[in-house]
Amino acid sequence: MKLGVCYYPEHWPESVWADDARRMRELGISVVRVGEFAWSRLEPTRDNFHFDWLRRALDVLHAEGLEVVLGTPTATPPKWLVDEHPSILAVDEKGHPKGFGSRRHYCFSSQVYRQECQRIVERVVREFGTHPSVTTWQTDNEYGCHSTIVSYSADALAAFQSWCERRYQTIEKLNTEWGNVFWSMEYLSFDQIPLPMLSVTELNPAHRLAFWRFSSDQVASFNKLQSEIIKKHSPDRDVMHNFMGNFTEFDHYDTAKDIDIAAWDNYPLGFLDRDGVNLEDQKKWFRTGHPDSSAFHHDLYRGMGRLWIIEQQPGPVNWAPHNPAPLPGMIRLWALEAMAHDAELMSWFRWRQMPAAQEQMHTGLLLPDGTEDEAVDEIRQLGEDLAEIKRVMHSDDAPLQSEVALVFDYQGDQMLRIQPQGQNYGPLEWMQQFYSSVRRNGVDLDIIQPGAKLDGYKLVILANSVFISDELASLLASFKGHVVIGPRCGSKTEEYSIPPELPPAAVQSLMPIKVTRVESLADFYSVATEGGFNAIKWREKVSGDVDAIDKFDDGWGFYYCHDRCHYLNACMDEESLVRFVENRLKEAGISTYKCSEGLRLRRKGNLVFAFNYGPDSVELDGSKRYLIGGQTLGVAEIAVWSD
Ligand code: GAL
């Protein structure tokens, strides 16, 4: 794994660039990302291109042997462009255009903006595409950051109507598929279809799903446009995009088709506070981040391309409700954990803290005055760790396929958000709970796309596959291992209605049951089974030819097993799901190792990594010869041994 940093030469006097580059190299950094917000400096007025400063910056970095990742500047259209073409602005749900003064103010559907992007990307790529320092391009920056996937502009409306026409062909088909006879919502032609906004009460879920699919397609085609220009004018360079954490507003698998490197931006403490984690967990993991948060995303994104962490939290950030400092040791732990999950790059955001503008309170590796901030010592230590790991790791060890696969369905996640049927139902949280339950049992897992090949796995888990296609159902039918199907899987058709055969629809060939009633539960209410499992949030009543394995105390059945297929008809509390998953792992012939709450393991080639997120020290196996750390693992510490 290489080390990197995000650097903004345009924020600093040219006189410090050479010193910065030297200090980066001395710290063990070899990759530097630049340029992704620099449009106003690259083209201060239309067609007046200023490329010299960037060329000099790249030369300075190159002179120190640093590789450059150059960003296309399209996340920040400059003021002159917005003034020339106000129609490029995204429009919010109330119909108001978004204003200039921050970033990501563009609409993915604006044809004018697409042409402008094509123009600037082509110029920048032609200019720097063969510069010897440039090895990789980043497209735009964090598609969707600050809730910017959807736009309700006139351009979006026209593009959505054509998208509907292409998908449904006739308006009668669309009306039937969406169930528009309900509440007299029928349309006479495609140009009557509005964007899903400003309605009196709930909109038709099928309409919302179609708009989500359309918006997701817009992101993929926007990215493809840039990727094609890069491939044409900067041959042999890789294309990367930086995805985000806990973000499902578009189908990342589609966008990832046009990139080589699936990078993501990891802010473990920021996510914990921002993303609706329950208070008890926030307290527990306040200075470490949740023990599965980073790993989950590493495993998700390594399923889309080569894995990079292009932005990593170096200390307190500025954008979460509260911005604590990480526990000493976490900078090193997060980095080694990324490495253990096959990351090729760990790069921090940012080199030097910027004393002005929005992110002045966001730490960097250096303080605004250029002195080293606290992360730097840990990065030095990390350099030694990586050298040690390199020495003992078998170099021919390609990433291993795990024994367990978790199917991640972006569309399913969205379907559950559109009609949650219980305000506390968190689809991503439930998915992550499954992920954690496998890891609490000491088992590694892959996260895969619906429809991906299942060969080689012993256990496959479906947690949010709300619509199960015939393709997925037949993959499951021919799969030789065990399948766990969670609640609400197979509960809708592709166009968002209840399937005629009742849920779980397409998987009834594996599991001959019908879900006849569902209920959602408030947070203060849970229901226990005779076997001691505890259902929370969601429960289903099931009928059919398969008997329940266990029973709730009010008589509803719990958990159905038919051959190697397991249907779980309730959401469960943390400890119940860990135990449930442990039983399924064992039945599938997978060896488990019970991890305490904050301990996580990860195998990579011949090495095993142990990470302790706390709250207490952990005693590991005394019979191992530790390469890093030892038998007693303190909080925020790492141990590595060879198996
Ligand atoms: C990311 C973004 C960066 C910077 C960073 C601050 O979301 O890509 O540009 O804003 O957050 O944590």
Image: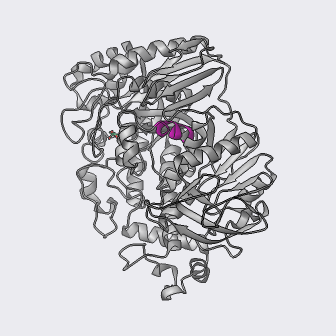
Q: Quadrant of residue 540?
A: bottom right
| Residue 174 left/right relative to 273 | right
Query: Is the stretch drawn in magenta largely helix, strand or loop?
Result: helix
In the image, 572 versus 391, the foreground residue is: 572
On the question of residue 197 being in view, the answer is yes
In the image, 184 versus 113, the foreground residue is: 184
In the image, 426 versus 283, the foreground residue is: 283
Is 293 a magenta residue? Answer: yes
| Residue 258, image x, y percentages | 56, 45
Q: Quadrant of residue 379?
A: top left
In the image, 347 versus 607, the foreground residue is: 607
| Residue 1 left/right relative to 32 | right
Residue 195 sits above or below residue 91 on the image: below
Residue at (46% x, 33% y) in the render? 309
On the question of residue 132 being in view, the answer is no
Residue 182 sits above or below residue 574 on the image: below
Q: Which residues are magenta?
A: 291-300
Residue at (66% x, 34% y) in the render? 592
Colouring mode (rainbow / by chain / secondary structure / one colour) = one colour
Residue 438 sits above or below residue 517 on the image: above
Residue at (56% x, 23% y) in the render? 609
* Quadrant holding the C terminus: top right
